[in-house]
Amino acid sequence: MSDGTRNEPITVVGAGLAGTLLAILLARRGHRVRLYERQEDMRRVQIDAGRSINLALAARGIRALELAGVMERVHTELVPLPGRMLHDLNGALTFVPYGQRPDEVIYSVSRPGLNCILLDAAEEAGVELVFRHPAVGADFKRQRVLFKNESGQTHEVGMHRVFATDGAGSVLRRAMVEQLGIACTEDLLKHGYKELTLPPYPDGRPRIDKHALHIWPRGGFMLIALPNIDGSFTVTLFLSLNGPESFETLTTPASIETFFAKHFPDVRELMPELASEFLSHPTGIMGTVRSEQWSLDDKLLLVGDAAHAITPFHGQGMNCCFEDCRELDTLLANSSDWAASFRQFETSRRPNTNAIADMAIENYLEMRDTVRDPKFHLHKALSLELERRHPQRFVPRYSMVMFRDDIPYTVAFERGRIQHEILVSLTERAETLDAVDYELAKRLIENRLAPLPAGRPTPNPLP
């Protein structure tokens, strides 16, 4: 932006991960930024239990944190995860690596830990933080955003460069729908989630392998566990909200103990507070948000989950939102026309956010069910073999999404579809890697997959 706009006030609504990162980037460009948050300052209060799904930090998110100058602070919160550990009903373990290079690693990170780091960095960058001031609505005719202060009184802020980062239930997006007639869908899954704790041993050692994302796939539902830096694991049950085996039927200690003994016997013995945590922690809901319009002239822009919330099953919710911030920062740096930058952001990002939303749903089916199919493991192994043989053309979809921040989600989605068709064709009569016709594979790959640009190394956030 030109120097003439440097002193214009900017309002960011929502001090979650995306809003705080965006505020930092705007402040680092010299803008005055005021960041409103409905909750208390999480650095000063205890975080509510059961509402902090651990996050998977990958290349797209790392690049954005590097841009904001905070990556060095974040590394103390990270646990590297080179692959998935699958647990079957009998307790047998199968490790499935995410990739085949040392840098193809994702990182488990605590949401509140990361958010606190970003809040500190925002304050240091000059951002004014205003807590306990929820946005309660907007008046688009008068161009005002409405907030409530700590006393419950409503006050107004001019709609002048407002960035709505207030999450999947965005008040400002819903105000756009109600007042401007914008079409928006909020598709809730029929499955919810419950967060639990797998504590470490008394001496701090983890009770299961710390360097893996653990999955207990059970067909229609699953349990996952992500490590924390203190040796504990955040365990999340994804289960139907209604039905014979669902959250609505798990309402007593006995029903919870019976359910876990039946489906997750190995982990049940490691969670002494299972029933009490289950009953005291909330059941979360998940869904996908798609809005036909994210911006209003040069006045307002929806960013992150407020514009395009997705389900958590590809580990890309945070990374996608952080990529929003990075791409928006680039647009604002190269133009003095806010309205044009907002429109360009919306036009370029929407196809990609739609693509990752679809891939996230597909990954849920894979994690809870497909991973139990021997063909899945053959396809996984063959994908890595084809990548070794054709590294410029065949890159597994998961790798494109998680480790290649230079490949748009739309490209990963389409190439992934083609690659799956190739894998199915090659394994139609082959049950092992040795039985695969690699000459046919070469012809299919060269005919259907154009070469990709050489990828830049996946950033390593650890010192």
Image (spheres, rainbow, N blue to C red):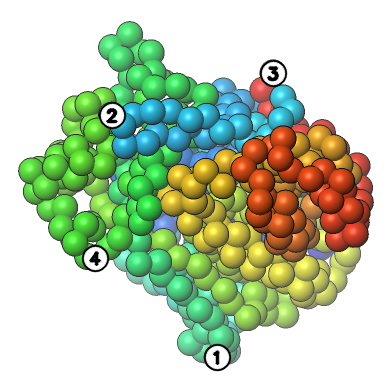
Residue 30 percent coordinates (x, y): 77, 50
User: Can you tell which mark lies on residue 35?
Assistant: none
Question: Could you give the CA–CA distance between mark 1 and mark 4, rounded to whole angstroms?
Answer: 33 Å
User: Which class describes the residues within 10 Å of circle 2: few (<14), some (14-19), or many (20+)?
Assistant: some
Position of the C terminus by quadrant: top right
Residue 303 percent coordinates (x, y): 62, 63
Residue assigned mark 2: 266
> Left or right: 375 with respect to 338?
left
User: Which class describes the residues within 10 Å of circle 3: few (<14), some (14-19), or many (20+)?
Assistant: few
Residue assigned mark 3: 463
Above-or-below relation of 191 to 368: below
Amino acid type at image mark 4: Asn
Q: Earlier in the sequence, mark 1 or mark 4?
A: 1
Question: Could you give the CA–CA distance between mark 2 and mark 3, rounded to whole angstroms?
Answer: 35 Å
Residue 341 percent coordinates (x, y): 80, 69
Determine which quarter of the picture holds residue 247. Answer: bottom left
Question: Could you give the CA–CA distance between mark 3 and mark 1, rounded to whole angstroms?
Answer: 50 Å
Residue depicted at x 66% and y 51%: 429
Residue assigned mark 1: 181
Viewer-side label of 1, 4: 4
Residue depicted at x 73% and y 75%: 298
Amino acid type at image mark 3: Pro
Marks 3/1 in contact by CB < 8 Å: the verdict is no
